[in-house]
Amino acid sequence: MSTITATPSATHAGGGASPHHGDLYEVPIDVSYEADVWGSIRRSVAANAASAQASAADLESARLLYQSELASDYFQVQGLDADRALLEETVRSYEEYLKLTQDRFQGGVVSMADVALAQTQLEGARAQLADVGIHQHGRAVLDAQHLEAPPCGGRKLPRQIRRDQAYAARHYHQRDRSLE
């Protein structure tokens, strides 16, 4: 590190009974230089640069994490909506099939086993529809809680663990550089 300082001054001598007339100008300059013999300044600059890079990487990692979670949530919601629409149509079809099967049973064309099978299919589809409704409700609750608490009640998900490992590695190397 180098420092240069200068403090210029000027004086006027002469006049009256003095035989010497003239101006005196002084410009004292002080120069100091700290030699980086052991490389501490260079390592300090490198450590600060690594710290800035680690912070930028953390910011980018967080941005990418939230973007990927948003995309995942979007596709999950779209999938649940499509499942719900399909199951609602399936329930309507099975209700018509059950009515048709009951009419055929009354006409003596099919057995009671066919009616029971149609009822079982209808109840299975209704159960699946209810299950999708529960998943949609659960998803809404998780989305609301996600704003207040980490996902999974504080347990780490695999991608969170990988992100934590990357963070630890960056900061380990940064600390290692600052100790050199």
Image (cartoon, rainbow, N blue to C red):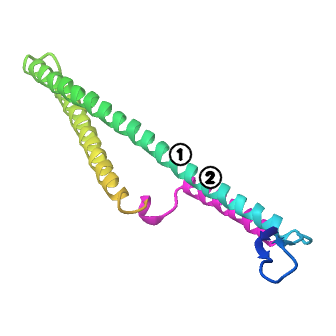
Residue 59 is left or right of residue 37, and the answer is: left
Amino acid type at circle 2 is: Ala
Q: Which mark is residue 64?
A: 1
Residue 180 shows in the view:
no
- What is the magenta segment's predominant secondary structure? helix
Front-most of 179 and 153? 179
Q: In which quadrant of the rendered image does the N terminus lie?
A: bottom right
What residue sits right under mark 2 in the picture? 57
Residue 139, position as x, y percentages in the image: 32, 48
Residue 9 lies, with reference to residue 102, above or below; the image says below
Residue 88, position as x, y percentages in the image: 22, 30
Q: Residue at x 39, y 63 (%)?
A: 149
User: Is 165 covered by the magenta stretch?
Assistant: yes
Q: In which quadrant of the rendered image does the C terminus lie?
A: bottom right
Amino acid type at circle 1 is: Leu
User: Is 40 covered by the magenta stretch?
Assistant: no
Front-most of 9 and 134? 9
Q: Residue at x 11, y 23 (%)?
A: 99
Span of residues in magenta = 151-180
Element carrying mark 1: helix
